[in-house]
Amino acid sequence: MRPIFRTALVSTLTIAALAAGAVPAMASPTDSVAGDSAAAAPARLSAIQASAAAKTSARIASLNSAIPRVTANRALSDAERSTILGTLNADLAAMKSLAAKIAADTDAATARTDYASIFTGYRVYAVALPQAHFAAAADALTDTVIPRLTAAESKLAAALAGKYASKSTPELQAKLADMTTQIAAATAAADGTAARALAVTPSDYNANHAVMAPIRASIASAHAAAKLARADAKSIMAALK
Amino acid sequence: MPAARVRSAIAAFGLVVVLSGCAGRPTADGPASVPSTDATGPASTGSASSGPGPSATDDLGAVQADLDQAASAQRQSEDDLANGDTASRQGDDH
């Protein structure tokens, strides 16, 4: 066979195989079902069901792992913990329900719709779990990190103005001023961030896949500022000892 | 009750009231429960020439305790942030 004919034959066979559903496109669960033929549907249904079982199983495992950790997380307020556990437990129940429903679906179109809802309806990995962790991260900042840094800053200011006045230098005063600035920056970045994280819904994410990014950035910014404030405090402490 | 007895009882009661009022009256030097400051008491502030005293060391210990708590909570916060990142990467629902 001449090369040009071999290439044409391979291309034709590949297109035919794809059209028949021999290569299920599970990476794109929202693919159109318009091209499904009656003969292809059963094969695609089983592929959808297999993938759905894997996807729901992974989410169920992740939720089962996260729920006890959220329950034990002391950084979260009781109200926020209750909100988060409500979401995670509801998602857990939904994943189990969807797994059973898709396994029992008898046509590819219904299965594909149910399959898509694993993602678009719950966003376990994109919203539910990150928002739980981000809220805890923000609460640790607002409830402990920043108050403790503020207390340290007040004590250091008093020490430099009183008992350690003889050791106070412009450099130490500048460190103290920077510590105050960094605490203010951390406070500005962290305040309200837990509530912002918990307010994000799957619909928000569906409309804007970057919806969690600014929340994450606020927490990272607060971490950076708090770290600088601690470094200032350590410098002052080292000079006073 | 005879009038003389009533008068006697009232007089006795009045005497008790007057005596207890005198006992509780603050002196010009202030309440006895408030210790006065004098030269023999511990200095509340250290002078520049004598250097920081033991209470100053305690102050630095308190600052260190605050910083330790802040550091511990920040580690937890950073772990939570990393766990959120891990969850975000774990999903294929993007």
Image (cartoon, coloured by chain):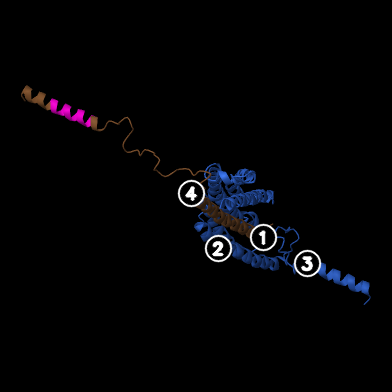
Residue type, label 4: Gly
Q: Name the residue under label 3.
A: A18
Q: Name the residue under label 2.
A: A65
In this view, the mark in front (3 or 2): 2
At a point 89% along the width and 70% down the height, the residue shown is A8
Alpha-carbon neighbours of circle 2 within 10 Å: few (<14), some, or many (≥20)?
few
Three-letter code, disc 1: Arg
Viewer-proximal residue among A19 and A195: A195
Residue B53 badge? 4
| Bounds of the magenta segment | B10-21
Residue A139 located left or right of residue A49: left
- The overriding secondary structure of the stretch rendered in magenta is helix
**Tag 1 residue:** B89
Eye-nearest disc, 1 or 3: 1
Q: In the rendered structure, the residue with mark 2 lies on which chain? A: A
What kind of element bears circle 3? helix
